[in-house]
Image (spheres, rainbow, N blue to C red):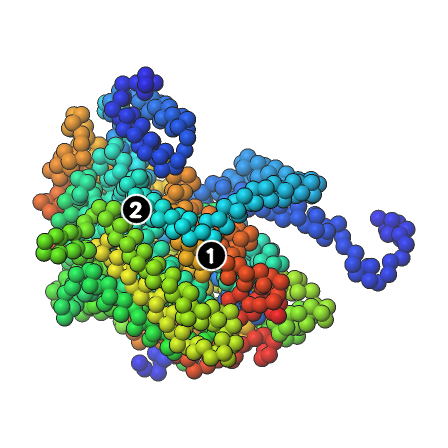
Amino acid sequence: MELCGDNRSGSLQGVFEVLNKTIVRLAIPIAASALVLSACGSDDDGGGGGDGQTYKIAYQGPISGQNVALGENMANGIQLAIDEANESGDYDFKLEYFPADDQGSETQATAAAQSAIDDPDVVAVIGPAFSGPTQVAAPLYGQAGLASVSSSATNPTLTDQGFGTFLQAVPNDNAQGAAMAEWLASQDGVSSVMVVDDKSPYGEGLAEVAVNGLEEAGLDVETASVPADTVDYSSAAHDVVSSGVDALIYAGYYEALAPFAIRLNEAGYDGIGVSGDGSNDAELIHLAGDAAEGWYLTCPCTDATQEEATQSFAERYQAAYDTPPGTYSAESYDVANMIIQQIDGLQGNVDRQSLYQALAGAEYEGLTKTFSFDESGAFAEQKIYMYQVDGGQIGYLGAVDELAAG
Amino acid sequence: MSATTTARPAMSVAARLRRRRWYQQPRWQRLFAMVVLALVMTQVTGAQGVRGDLFAALQDNFTGTGLWIWLAIFVGIWLVREFLGEPLGRYASLAGRQVTGPARRVGDLVRGNRLYRWGGLALLLAFLIVLPLMVSTFWQQVMVDQVGMYVMVALGLNVVIGWAGMLDLGFIAFFAIGAYSAAYWTGGLPVDPPFEVNNFLAIPLAMVTCLIAGVLLGAPTLRLRGDYLAIVTLGFHEIVYLLAKNWSEFTGGTRGAPGLDRFSVDLGFWSYKWELDPQPYYWLQLGLVVVVLALFLRLEHSRVGRAWTAIREDEVAAAATGVNTVRFKLLAFAIGASTSGIAGVAYASKQGFINPEQFVVLMSVLALSYVVFGGMGSIPGVLLGTAILVWLPERLRDTVDPQDRFMYLGGLLVIMMIYRPQGLWPSKRRQHELKMAETGTGGADALGAQPGGGQA
Amino acid sequence: MSVSDIWDVLVLGVVLGSLYAVIAIGYTLVYGVLQLLNFAHSEVFMSGGYGGVIALTLVEPVADPSGLQSFGYVILGICAGALLGGLVAFGLEKAAYLPLRRRNAPRLVFLITAIGASFFLYNLAGKLFGRYPMPMPTMYENRKLFEIFGTSVSVTQLIIVVTALVMLLLVDFVVNRTKLGSGIRAVAQDPEVASLMGVNIDRVVSRTFVLGGLMGGVAGFLFGTNLQVEYTMGFLPGITAFAAAVLGGIGNVRGAMLGGLTLGVVEAFTVELWGDAWRYVGAFAVLILVLMFRPTGILGERVGRTA
């Protein structure tokens, strides 16, 4: 066992796990011992920087399937945070990234969550990325006492259900929908608004809050639903134009907004266009080209490429993954760093429960915003920022409450 | 060049017609196919595409070593087949006979003897009962949420397609109806039911709902032939899916129905509640499957089962000999639908949350391929096929890039259908039907004639 | 709904419907000769979209193309889409269906093979080109071209309808007037007799696949121009076009055209009246209703008999 160094308790657990799996596979004992040896070997290789524990931070989200683009943004952000922490040498523990792929699907969510729960080295989970899988997976995390910190599941009802260890590290849809309404109401010459959602839980939730806010502000509101997988946006664009509204809110993701914006442009729509964080992605401009010009995009995030504090993050991200950070990259990076900071703060007494307690009470100033949670695990500060596509760039305008007031 | 052609003796017209250029000869065509296969395999195992750079993966694959490895492998296979094929083939068939001979004797022994057969079944059941104790919780979740659920659905689908021979591409619709009925009757939907019931009581209610839905869909459409039925059932599924998605007042719409009741038993003196732990669900599902299986096994060899076989093999002949085809087809539809409904209740209760995205059309297509993969019409085949195909992507999670899992699954389906079209564990009758089809003496399903001129 | 609205919706429906019609041809041709539901045709369609993107990315269209340049780009895209579509269809037939035909496999086996091939192909495309939607490079300035009865028609819409029309006329000509066409019709009616009469069935089947693939590829390019190109783009249009082929009478080329147009228009009106969320409910309800009263589709089955 000397091969395994001083990391004894950890590798013993590993041995048991390997044995357990081996029994299932009905492999011969020799294979088992070979696996044990290789497990120890890799532990040793990884333990070069410090001689402390290895902690795993899991990410539950879509790493395959339809929504992989959004999931990858987050996975990269988390991995970057972990790699940087390991390389910095500031910590006397090692961190490892643990992917738990749920394909963004509820059916896969339990198995994905369980794979993270089953690994005793996993001390915290970032995710689930989407609200639907969160409904299914969060109770499991709650039972296991494993903190699940989602940087992107924005459904406001999630924190009402008493999942136990769920922390919503992102302002929920209520804040964003209300901000859109507030901002539109403050604009001159806007008296009628059409709210189009994409028939996703995210879009519908956002649209509902926006509609309520707009109606309260005394504007005329029309609604429509266009599923994100529709084969033709011409009909929807035709409806918008023929209704003659002054402004349009699109509640959905950039993949769908791009063709919609093109059709709108073609149909001669010249009103204001507003969309939420799901569309706030550089890819929107790539896909929609000139048609994206002038669109307003809200986000609970400050743009990673705009603010000075985050400029260097964007550069490091670009260097590591050959692509600029996308929606929720910086937020996931922040959440991962928040977790790492809390692990450090516990000074070796890290278990799942204590880490959850630490996270729930934490206040962490990240690149994008200051993270803290209220008692239900909802995000404490609910500030929304406004962007506008201008000259092929997503330009930062400022915080919505300030813009609406000024 | 022209000198050599004129030097040849004049060919007859027929000979000239028969003459092929060198590249038209089968041997070289096979080489060409192998090279193409190698290229495809290079892409399959190659790099992942990069956002914003269309040709990144292609460039990587064509400049990497993978290309040469695959070319070597496939050209090697071609060389062996072309020049060493015959002696190797003789040896292989000899070895094959030596292996299959004893295996078949053991098989006959087990099948022939009642005691062995029941003993084997009991052993298998005992193994299935203790199985969850031997695997990690992750695999328990997979077994319950994915394997268990699809197994039940596949059993139902087997009745419709395997026994009655009707091509149903919308089977998950009934699963969805079952799940939503369970949610409704346990008070989980925005609309309150007249009275709330326990999940166990929701099972018969869901079965009845599915049965009615099955008959409603089946009655007007069952006189359609195979392919028409396929698209109609697919359309039915899409309509059910869109209803679940758009009728928010009843179903909760896209945001779904959270916090559903879980199974519970309260007998006064003893009560039990199924919670988050997957193990108890596993045993519950196993129990349900065993009950359904016991009923189905009786059904297969009853008058009803024989009527289905007759319909599957030749509907016109069956009708001519006095089988009420419409009634029996409706019956198959209804039985299949209600089985799927049971699965729906179990699923909704385990997940505690349902939304329309859990019942997409793709799942119906998958369920169909599970059944055929295992060997349609054969219960052990269907169970095995479903278990393997659901298990495989989860297993591949650790070995291949998770994004590529369904690519491999698709490839596997194609290869399987080419080399073993009867499925993993075909029923004897089905095997016979396929053999008859191969020699062109009968139809192998109720879908009409075979493609490419196999009609008798 | 005012009269001008009806015209607007009709135009949208015809544009969409002509796309469906071109895809549906692929299903119907293959069904005619093989009685096979070629589920993987939606992936042939998808590869046409990628063909267009690849060709146009290689060429790099200039920023402000002249009319002639734009025309060239569109033709290039169409050809590239058709080429890749035809290639994929050809490979699909040789690799997946030919071995099955050799052993006279039943149709369900074909169907599962088609499903498997479809899974394989679209995931492979996702792997190679990235699992992101990508826009068709700008080939022309898309603007309002002219008006009919107060409804404006854009360049994209015109391109789609005209190309679809040309493709449909072409396929109708091939099926009814050429040697290949008579081969297709002969195989569709009775493969055994056709074979006895000297029709090379393998060759006819293979070429039918290629013909269907060309159609699918062109439709994929047009669809990508109208929306965007993505590895999953084949699924829904594929299913709808399949429904269109069945609606018109599967195996019947003119039926597929009619079915495609009908479904396109039905969808457009459904969307106008009840919203985009109910799009397919309208389409499939019409399909089920028609099949209840005409079990073999509007124009009936088979290439050989009616077309």
**SS assignment at label 1:** loop
Which residue position is annotated with label 1? Answer: B375
Find out whether the residues at labels 1 and 2 contact each other: C-beta distance under 8 Å.
no
Which residue position is annotated with label 2? Answer: B129
Q: Where is residue C233 in the image (x, y as percent from the top left)?
A: 43, 58
- Residue located at (52% from left, 40% from top): B61
Q: In this view, does C266 lie to the left or right of B86?
A: left
Q: Can residue B65 be seen in this view?
A: yes
- To which quarter of the image does residue C173 belong? bottom right
Q: Position of residue B221 (x, y in %)?
A: 40, 76
Disc 1 marks a residue whose amino acid type is Gly
Q: Which of marks 1 and 2 is nearer the N terminus?
A: 2
Disc 2 marks a residue whose amino acid type is Ile
Label 1 or label 2, whichever lies nearer to me, is 2
**SS assignment at label 2:** helix
Tell me the chain of label 1. B
Nearest the eye: B329 or C55:
B329
Badge 1 crowding class, 10 Å Cα cut-off, few under 14, some 14 to 19, many 20 or more, is: many
Nearest the eye: B44 or B353:
B353
Q: Is residue A327 visible?
A: no
**Residues at marks 1 and 2, CA–CA distance in whole angstroms:** 24 Å
